[in-house]
Image (cartoon, rainbow, N blue to C red):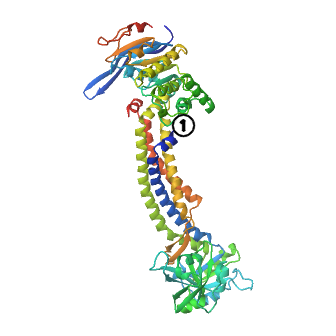
Amino acid sequence: MPETVIQTRKLTKEYVREDYHVFALKEADIEIGRGEFVALMGPSGSGKSTLLHCIAAMDRPTSGEILVLGQDLSSLNERDIAHWRNVHIGFIFQSFNLIPVLSALENVELPLNLTALKKQERREHARNALELVGLGDRLHNLPRQLSGGQEQRVAIARAIVTDPDLILADEPTGNLDAASAQEVLNMLSRLNKEFGKTIVMVTHDPHAARFASKIRYLEKGELLPDGRTPADWNLPAAEATSG
Amino acid sequence: MRIPFSYNIRNLVVRKTTTIMTALGIALTVAVLLSVLALVNGLQTSLRSSGDPKRILVMRKGATAELTSGVTRQAFQDLKFKPGIARDSAGQPLASLEIVTVINLPSVDSEAGMNVTTRGLLQPGIEIRNLKLAEGRWFESGRRELVVGKGIAARYPDARLGGTLKFGKGEWTVVGVVDAGTGPINSEILGDLNQVAGDLNRMEGLSAMWLVAEDEITAKSLINSINDDVKLTAQAKSEVEYLEAQTSSAAPIQFIGIFVSLIMAVGSSFAAMNTMYAAVSRRAREVGTLRVLGFSKGSILTSFFLESLVLALVGGVLGCLLALPLNGLTTGVGNNLTFSEIAFNFRVGPDTMATGIVFALVMGALGGLFPARSAARKEILTALREI
């Protein structure tokens, strides 16, 4: 087992609504090692996004422990969490979430504004990241001047520009056509294989999940044991779990 | 480091209609405030800048203005040989006995007419005030001739050079226009003391005495000497002190103007607040994204707050531009001490404009603070889920 990057123990997220309780995540235990590419799958409401949000410290669990990169996230205050996220996490959204009034280059440069880099260095890093995702010729385009696939590649460049330890992707191909989805998945795979990035990806798409080295399933807030799929899911991914 | 400033600027440009409308609201408020300040500033400049600490006004004890004062020729004879009074090249004391009244003249603003201060003075009265003719010539003794201040010539059609005015016992001809800078003489009509007093049947019932001291220190001792002179029963004060008291005539305008501006400012602040709340709401997902990228709540608050300040700054600059054409424009206000009109120029100076900009920024700050706080307080996931 490589060095553990993510470790959760009995991680629980419970929503309380007037007269009923909902477990978005129930006592989830998971360990993800450095350099792994893990796909989290499961039906809607199964808790996969909740788990991802807890890993990114965007949401706080109701109970249980979560260590990410050895850091107990519950011990950090809001400001430290923001800084921690900037340094260690690259996040890719389903709907890209680029800032519409900023160019591709400026969007990618955004997280670097929180570093000690000088403007020229920030520009250089952002340009390199965009070239890495094949958008070196679209530096000054606004998001609306790009295709969906290109937008997501800009989002990937933004996620990797700070050279984070962990890349988290929430349905990164959910809003893309098949060709663009393929490009994005190839890119994530390359980031994992060539650059050794640890990636956790939430997806509904079995095809997308095949790019991961490991698939973990969630059902009704519970993380199923390694290698098991939900009973009523017709998933071809059992073999991928050993990858 | 904060969120790039270009993010805020471009957002303002993208929603330009909202930006312009909000900025215009702020601009109008600033313009109203600046108009009032320019008016008050102009009046105060007019009254204060012309004051000379060496010039002394002597009135009846208890009088607050020349119009309500009364002095006799005998008192003038007793006064003009007091030590410390400056003398002209001929060795005569620079002291002038004067009569002050108001006459009603139709103005460009009011056909019903406005009260204008009319002053009869002795020849030294001209030298005392260092008056210079802009047009025509000085009035002659024993003739119904008048010289008018530049402000009067501009605002009263009948009082232009060559015009005739009817008061007292006959018609008076305007033979000259005097340029007294920003001083109150610009709002007065001048004539020969004896001719004016005779026409008004007030040969003995004169108003006040003006004199010039040799220097400022002498002026103070001269004032004390006059005030302590039991025989004179008069009070003396420096021109600076006298004009300072007259600036109170601007107080009601200043109060109403500032009151109206404040009411408008409340409206404009709410408009800015509404605009910023809409911006926060529309950009909730961007807020969530920025938080995920590592920007703190403080950065978000600062960013939206700055955006509101920029919006207000645009409004402030527009407001200054709207008010700028008023600069130098001649107007007049009633003086509650002299019961006459003082003509002066609006003055939109750098200090006035700076006040307008600061006022706009305060509106922006008030309007932006709560929306910015609301943006900063958004939970990341809630913000990301908003459309």
Q: Amino acid at mark 1?
A: Pro
For the N terminus of chain B, the quadrant is top right
Question: Is residue A70 in sight in this rendering?
Answer: no
Question: Is residue A174 in sight in this rendering?
Answer: yes
A1 w.r.t. A78: above or below: above
Q: Of residues B70 and B90, which is closer to you in this image? A: B90
Q: Could you tell whether B147 is left or right of B366 in the image?
A: right
Callout 1 secondary element: loop
Quickly name the residue at label 1: B4
Q: Residue furthest front?
A: A179
x then y, percent, for residue A191:
52, 17
User: What residue appears at the point 55 percent right and 16 percent down from the top-left corner?
Assistant: A195
x then y, percent, for residue B266:
42, 54
For the C terminus of chain B, the quadrant is top left
- Dot 1 surroundings within 10 Å: few (below 14), some, or many (20 or more)? some
Tally the numbered discs.
Answer: 1
B229 w.r.t. A71: above or below: below
B34 w.r.t. B105: above or below: above
x then y, percent, for residue A171:
41, 22
Q: Of residues B60 and A182, which is closer to you in this image? A: A182
Q: Of residues B293 and A130, which is closer to you in this image? A: A130
Q: Chain of mark 1?
A: B
Q: Of residues A57 and A89, which is closer to you in this image? A: A89
User: What residue appears at the point 41 percent right and 50 percent down from the top-left corner?
Assistant: B270
x then y, percent, for residue A136:
57, 27
